[in-house]
């Protein structure tokens, strides 16, 4: 895709080593700028890349609007990357839109470009937890989650096991076929496609995952990856939600075995769905990561709450 005067190419599996390198340089602790998420959502949000010596630009498309992810680079190259991106949007004759920007990056951009406007849609905020708390479920505030966990153990303690996912990929796909299959939400359709993609490419994405089996049948699975050196990101959690406590046990088992050097867990955003928000808030996040949509100050609605 030629955009402005630069050639952008679709992001694909061959780009994994390069994107990993630049993500490490950027060191963003934000769920959209995670290798697994960048690739698994491409059916719904196609991505195109441009690579320079010092940065990588990623262009996404959402509801027909082209936008720029945070440039993948060391912070000292951020201003240059934004200038280059702004120029190509101008040459293409469309508004410069940036999405999924963290507060610190947003503030650096607004210092340089005070004419830009920024808004922060609540549904985009990431939920971050203490890993140890999700493993032990200790403390008064987690009593309800602990009750669900104990309810599961009372019913299934001698009939369940938690196993590495590699030997159960096909059983996970079978569970995925019936997971919320009575819901025709477009988002769930694309989530299934993305989950299938991750299961099919589990090894090359360098994720870690596990399955919860009851009577040797997969009733839930969970997949995570590094969000940073200190943070694990939960990319996928799917389970038979008719089983009380299944998600609490999935998370506890997974986080007690994998990513044990990480102190934080990013469970991503709630997409504006009230049931997800209630569940994530009930797990007592340590903090939320605010994310911003940044636009040039023009007469348009940026669909995130700000108007120029």
Image: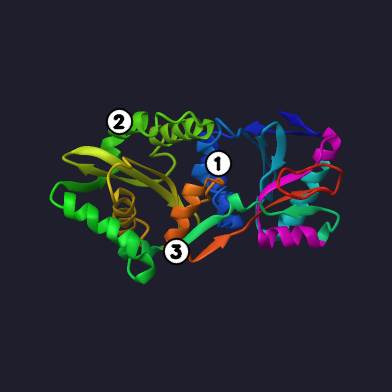
Indicate yes or no whether the magenta region holds residue 93.
yes
Residue contact between numbered discs 2 and 3, judged by CB atoms under 8 Å: no
Q: Which of labels 1 and 3 is toward the front?
A: 3
User: What is the number of the mark on residue 170?
Assistant: 2
Comes first in the chain, label 1 or label 3 = 1
- Secondary structure found at label 1: helix
- Marks 2/3: CA–CA distance: 34 Å
Rendered location of residue 246, percent (x, y): 29, 48
Residue furthest to the left in view is 158
Residue at the location (57% across, 51% down)?
A: 23
The kind of secondary structure element at disc 3 is: loop
Q: Position of residue 125 (x, y in %)?
A: 58, 54
Give x and y (percent) for residue 132. 36, 66
Q: Tell me the number on the disc at residue 306.
A: none
Q: Residues within 10 Å of mark 3 (few under 14, many from 20)?
A: some
Q: Which mark is residue 284?
A: 3
Residue placed under numbered mark 1 in the picture: 38
What SS does tag 2 mark?
helix
Depth order, front residue of 96/10: 96
Colouring used for the render? rainbow
Tell how many labels. 3
Find the distance from the CA under tag 1 to the CA under tag 3.
27 Å
Q: Which residues are magenta?
A: 88-111
Q: Along the line of sight, which residue is nearer the eye, 155 or 95? A: 155
Counting residues from the start of the chain, the first of labels 2 and 3 encountered is: 2
């Amino acid at each position: 895709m030629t955009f402005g005067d630069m050639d952008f190419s679709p992001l694909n599996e061959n780009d994994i080593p390069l994107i990993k390198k630049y993500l490490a340089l950027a060191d963003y602790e934000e769920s959209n700028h995670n290798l697994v998420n960048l690739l698994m959502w491409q059916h719904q949000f196609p991505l195109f890349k441009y690579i320079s010596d010092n940065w990588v630009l990623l262009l996404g498309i959402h509801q027909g609007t082209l936008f720029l992810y945070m440039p993948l680079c060391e912070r000292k190259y951020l201003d240059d990357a934004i200038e280059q991106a702004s120029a190509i949007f101008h040459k293409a004759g469309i508004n410069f839109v940036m999405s999924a920007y963290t507060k610190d990056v947003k503030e650096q951009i607004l210092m340089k470009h005070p004419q830009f406007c920024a808004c922060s849609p609540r549904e985009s905020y990431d939920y971050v937890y203490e890993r140890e708390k999700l493993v032990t479920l200790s403390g008064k505030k987690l009593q309800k989650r602990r009750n669900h966990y104990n309810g599961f153990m009372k019913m299934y303690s001698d009939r369940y096991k938690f196993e590495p996912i590699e030997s159960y990929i096909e059983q996970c796909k079978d569970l995925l076929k019936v997971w919320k299959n009575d819901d025709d939400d477009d988002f769930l359709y694309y989530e299934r496609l993305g989950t299938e993609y991750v299961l099919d490419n589990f090894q090359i994405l360098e994720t870690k995952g596990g399955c919860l089996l009851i009577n040797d049948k997969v009733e839930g699975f969970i997949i995570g990856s590094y969000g940073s050196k200190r943070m694990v990101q939960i990319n996928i959690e799917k389970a038979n939600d008719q089983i009380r406590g299944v998600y609490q046990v999935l998370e506890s088992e997974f986080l007690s075995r994998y990513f044990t050097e990480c102190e934080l867990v990013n469970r991503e955003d709630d997409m504006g769905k009230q049931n997800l928000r209630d569940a994530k808030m009930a797990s007592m996040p340590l903090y939320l990561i605010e994310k911003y949509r940044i636009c040039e100050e023009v007469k348009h609605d940026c669909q995130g709450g700000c108007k120029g």
